[in-house]
Image: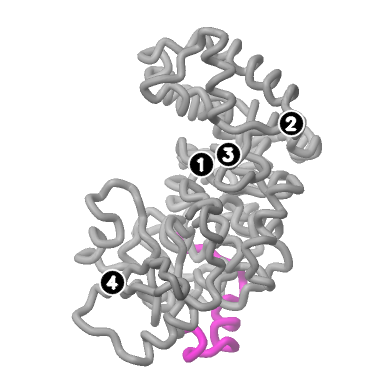
Amino acid sequence: MLDNWVMVTANELVELRMIAQGFVTAPFATPAVAAAHLSASQGQHLGGVIASLALRTTSGARADVVSAFARGEIVRGYPMRGTVFAVAADDLAWQLALTGPRQLASARRRRIEHGLDELVPQAAELARAAIAASPDRAITRAALGEAWEANDIPTDSGRLYHLVFTLMARGDVAYGPLRGSDHLLVDAHEWLPGSSSLEARFNSDERAALGHWLRAYLTGHGPATLRDFAWWTKLPLGRIRAAEAEATSELEAYGELEGETRWGRAGLREERERIGAETLAVGRLLPPFDELVLGYPDRHYIVPAEHHARLVPGNNGVFRPSAVRRGAILGTWSAKQRAAGREFLLESFAESVSEAARAEFARAFASYPHPEPDAAGE
């Protein structure tokens, strides 16, 4: 719908995206619903993605996310960009049908350099056999590496990572339940619901699946553009544009960026008014790699360019936990374990932070879904 076409400011854009992602009012009843709404949540930092999903649910409980992994409602895999994401188990198989071949083609040169390309079918067979032989039908990466080494498949010099990625991109394995700090590997053919395949969900219609995914991204991440989605998935923009009309038929336009319409869920502005400026301005803590920061190619709408290097030190791709207030990241944060408990540490981008802001961040820290010592992501 192109009614009420009004450009949005950077501050409003942050607030609208916070609402769309469920970060303000935590509207999702379960972690699985939150994961499905976001389509995919960047998950290199296991503790971070667990917290990201917990913060978007009504309970806010970390344990609920861990239980959802254990029940097979959420998994981690490589649905796109050669990056690990947490997704609803119902979505991983059909997403991989769209993106897996491109990911595998991009990584083929590295597989050849490592001498792994011809070993992939054998590695997949051995992985599924090792998982089937385990008591819980789930094993650690280390155990899988030992099984490969025992069968003359090398895992040194980064080969273990590339083999696991390759099998995940192929749809052979996924990360299922957790055991302490280990995210265990499962047989995706058995662990994922049979109804999650491209054939079962979309009658093998890739355009229908792409339109569904585009609509889900714009609903869960928007206001955002088609180019944002193309960057997020690394799928061809031409294919995405072919699905635009159907995918955006019930969405609303929120201005544009460089000639591209920003689409989002209808009624976000009205919801923003109902929530109110004071509630939206309150200081909040984001986990590392949260989708509010990494779900879009341009992060300068939420963090000033001059401070971006402090959010990603050395520009090494490792995003620190951040503190957001009034529509902008004001600094990064960490937790220090003391004898008396956790201590909140704020590294502000500015020389000083108001007492009101510090008090808001302290309250957010107190309710944050922290991991237990020695638990996943600690």
Amino acid residing under circle 1: Val
Cα–Cα span, label 1 and label 4: 28 Å
Residue 2 appears in the figure: no
Q: Is residue 200 above or below residue 232?
A: above
The crowd level at tag 2 (other Cα within 10 Å; few <14, some 14-19, many 20+) is some
Residue 90 lies in the magenta-colored region:
no
Q: Nearer the viewer, residue 168 or 185?
A: 185
Q: Disc number at residue 137?
A: 2
- Describe the colour scheme in one phrase: one colour
Q: Nearer the viewer, residue 68 or 90?
A: 68
Amino acid residing under circle 2: Arg
Q: From the top left corner, tell me how far across and down residue 312 is, in percent.
A: 29, 55
Amino acid residing under circle 4: Glu
Cα–Cα span, label 3 and label 1: 5 Å
Please tell me whether mark 2 or mark 1 is closer to you in this view.
2
Mark 2 or 4 closer to N-term? 2
Q: Residue at x 47, y 40 (%)?
A: 83
